[in-house]
Image: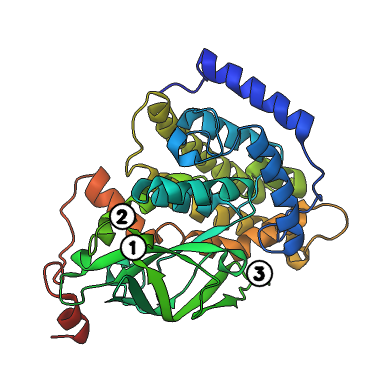
Amino acid sequence: MNFDDTPDEAAYRAQVRGWIAANRIPVPATRRHRHATPEWLDIARRWQALKADAGYVGIAWPKAWHGTDPAPEGTVAQQIIFDQEEAAAGLHFAFFEIGLGLCVPTVASFADQATVDRIAPPAKRGTQIWCQLFSEPSTGSDLAAVRTRAVRDGDDWIVDGQKVWTSGAQYSDYAILLTRTDPDAPKHRGMTMFWLDLTAPGVEVRPIRQMSGVANFNEVFLTGVRIPDTQRLGAVDAGWGTAMTTLMNERVSIGDVGGPDVATAIRLLGSDDRTVRATLVDRFIRAEGIRLTRSRLLTAISRGEKPGPENAITKLVAANEMQGLARDVLLARGPMGLVVERGDDAAEGIFHDSLTWAPGYRIAGGADEILRTVIAERVLGLPAEPRSDKDRPFRPAKEGA
């Protein structure tokens, strides 16, 4: 494992850092709610347009994925370097991550070139935003148990069902959608994926207000929604394989959960209390473990290797550490820990926001329990958990037959 950039990567990092310094836009000091309000969306779109014009969006995409918007073809390592420098400059926004990191690549992998030419340019510039309609109220973390039905009607499909915990649906224009098309097949073999326009008749989005005071998640109701078969992604009843394309990208992109770091905590607390200092040292050691584990992934990517299930380790630990560090800081602050953004120090609001938002990160991209299973079975090689419904028809299995 090499912690240093290669000479080419170091030159690219210097190029990116210089471009960001020359083109950065003004951003309010506070980070609070930056992923949820129209004001932040306007700021994010201005930055996104600058990036697209300079060729810094979809850096690692194949040329065909850019559609009619040509861009230089880079590497995954270059994309990661840009993301790191962008975050360090305080210019990271989440509005477009799902679309550009998950949805558009999935559509581009299965749709025709005309569709890619249509969706890629506006998605890159941030004028069209995407979300993914996967989770459902009755399925928990079992993605293969989706019950939203899609029934063939000539050249169209009629979709009825409900999705939940959909990030960004309230400001999204399009979505990828996983449906049940054959309830009599085993659950992994009876699903089909589509992409759809969220303004289509029968689509209703209802934001879910969280304890942080904002609505990052949504319920999405689908009632008699008509989707052309031309918007199907992959073969009929082969949606599980299509979904895996999306989920592998998701677990790589979400492995670095962000949030305030230990250095910010030290600056804010400035405590001489030995217990507080020992707690922060412990958090620092864990943060270094996360950083080094992620460096292993980045080293593999730099060598041209594909990311594997090991990234589940980073996401699992980082999401819990984000919540734990925020809790430690607010407890050390005493009664002032409940005050959000007192005075001019935005750091005070960051930890409050992280504490209330971290539970969502522990679900997004795979709940803690799912990731532990992935690590156990695919990394450590432990025996798989018994799955009594694996080869049974989905409908009887759900009815308890």
Which of the labelled discs sits on residue 193, or is there none?
A: 1
Earlier in the chain: of badge 1 and badge 3, it is: 1
Q: Quadrant of the N terminus?
A: top left
Callout 2, which amino acid?
Thr
The x and y percentages for residue 222 are 44, 79
The x and y percentages for residue 219 are 51, 76
Callout 3, which amino acid?
Ser
Q: Distance of mark 3 from mark 2, alpha carbons?
A: 33 Å
Left/right of residue 45 with respect to residue 242 in the rendered view: right
Which of the labelled discs sits on residue 212, or is there none?
A: 3
Nearer-the-camera pick, 383 or 200 = 200
Label 1, residues with CA under 10 Å away: few <14, some 14-19, many ≥20: many
Q: Point out the frontmost of discs 1 and 3.
A: 1
The residue drawn where x is 43% and y is 56% is 365
Left/right of residue 263 with respect to residue 176 in the rendered view: right
Quadrant of res 392? bottom left
The x and y percentages for residue 116 are 46, 47
Earlier in the chain: of badge 3 and badge 2, it is: 3
Please say if the residues under marks 1 and 2 sit with CB atoms less than 8 Å apart.
Answer: yes
Q: Distance of mark 1 from mark 3, alpha carbons?
A: 32 Å
Which of the labelled discs sits on residue 242, or is there none?
A: 2
Could you say whether the residue bearing mark 1 is in a helix, strand or loop?
strand
Callout 1, which amino acid?
Met
The x and y percentages for residue 190 are 21, 68
The residue drawn where x is 43% and y is 25% is 302
Q: Distance of mark 1 from mark 2, alpha carbons?
A: 7 Å
Label 3, residues with CA under 10 Å away: few <14, some 14-19, many ≥20: some
Q: Quadrant of the C terminus?
A: bottom left
Could you say whether the residue bearing mark 2 is in a helix, strand or loop?
helix
User: Can residue 355 be seen in the rendering of this structure?
Assistant: yes
Nearer-the-camera pick, 238 or 271 = 238
The residue drawn where x is 51% and y is 51% is 118
